[in-house]
Image (cartoon, rainbow, N blue to C red):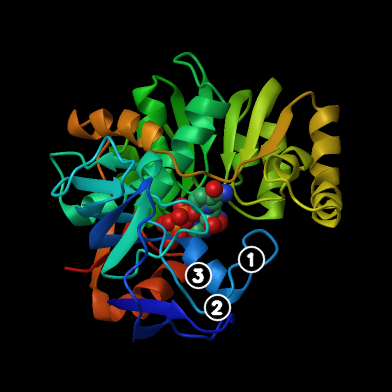
Amino acid sequence: MKAFIVDRYGKKESLRLGDVPEPEVREDEVLVQVHAAGVNLIDAKLRNGEFKLLLPYRPPFVLGHDVAGVVVRVGARVRQFKVGDEVYSRPDDFRIGTFAEFIAIKEDSLAIKPNNITMEEAASIPLVGLTAWQALVERAKLKAEQKVFIQAGSGGVGTFAIQLAKHLGATVATTASAGNVVLVKSLGADVVVDYKTQDFEEVLHDYDVVLNSQDGKTLEKSLNVLKPGGKLISISGPPDPEFAEAIKAPWFVKQVMRALSFGTRRKAKRLDVDYSFLFMKASGNQLRQITPLIESGAIRPVVDKVFPFASTNEALAYVESGRAKGKVVIKVR
Ligand SMILES: NC(=O)c1ccc[n+]([C@@H]2O[C@H](COP(=O)([O-])OP(=O)(O)OC[C@H]3O[C@@H](n4cnc5c(N)ncnc54)[C@H](OP(=O)(O)O)[C@@H]3O)[C@@H](O)[C@H]2O)c1
């Protein structure tokens, strides 16, 4: 089959379009014919070698973390899916590879695709949808009367997280540049801070939850907009000791993560707020809870651009530019 392959780590390395064997399908997996693949910043960061410590993939490997497609084979122990099912997924770490014609995915990480959206739209959902779900529902337990600040509302995670938070009934603040204000308001944002001309720290106070996705300085300032007892959840680091524990990181990696997050944890403690790092996980079960929100129209996919399969490198470069409005998707067939 055709696939886009990382041959070497490096920022300037292009993915190579090559022929690789069809993936082996384990007993608890299904083979999915890829119709569309979502592109995420983690794809660029992985290729650059920025995740070597956390996710030590050994090149050559096929990149890609989001998929929508059709089941073409099922493993012997698979119970929930059959050949012909239209599905979507964020495959498990170390079983990625959606920039390809086929991918084998664990049954537990798969869900039937929402029936009211295209394959391209469906491929835009899993990674960012699960990230928002795991941050706002699972970890923050966001409630209707609460206020949440979701950074970068016009991005992949932001466009989904704003809609999810509104669905939960919360008041939502976000940051966006002037050109994206209309977009984030249309998704439900109540308060929009223009990050190029305003300082969110001056505008936002007494928030219950912050979803941080930006740099260290933004993280630092985010602590100050929370009320005592509030929660700062960061998806852009620094990783904390609980995360190191959860992934069973080796001793030295644990020490690195402890050191990296030390300042943030100390300041959080002083302000009586909770800091935690989140690294999203594959989950078919949570995707199944997201599906009805899409089918009811409570959450709509926001797709900026669809690239043809042959232009996968261009799609990755566009995502890496940091200017995408919502999601970027590759149409594979
Ligand atoms: N830990 C995890 O599990 C996890 C999961 C998903 C994502 N992430 C991370 O979360 C971050 C966001 O991911 P994403 O996919 O949402 O990114 P994205 O879609 O590439 O974000 C692009 C958007 O961010 C906006 N933006 C850029 N700088 C901004 C700033 N300083 N303030 C506000 N908005 C800004 C841009 O708007 P303008 O063009 O107007 O600047 C653009 O619309 C990345 O670092 C990603 O790696 C982590």
**Total numbered labels placed on residues in the image:** 3
Rendering quarter of residue 77 = top left
Instruction: Determine whether the residue tagged by mark 1 lies in a helix, strand or loop.
Output: loop
Crowd band around label 1 with a 10 angstrom C-alpha radius: few (<14), some (14–19), many (20+): few
Number of the front mark, 2 or 3: 2
Crowd band around label 3 with a 10 angstrom C-alpha radius: few (<14), some (14–19), many (20+): many
Q: Is residue 174 visible?
A: yes
| Observer-nearest of 41 and 267 | 41
Q: Mark 2 highlights which residue?
A: 59
Q: Residue 44, which numbered label?
A: 3
Q: Position of residue 93 (x, y in %)?
A: 51, 55
Vertically, is 51 above or below 290? below
Q: Position of residue 168 (x, y in %)?
A: 39, 21
Rendering quarter of residue 15 = bottom left
Vertically, is 84 above or below 145? below
| Observer-nearest of 302 and 12 | 12
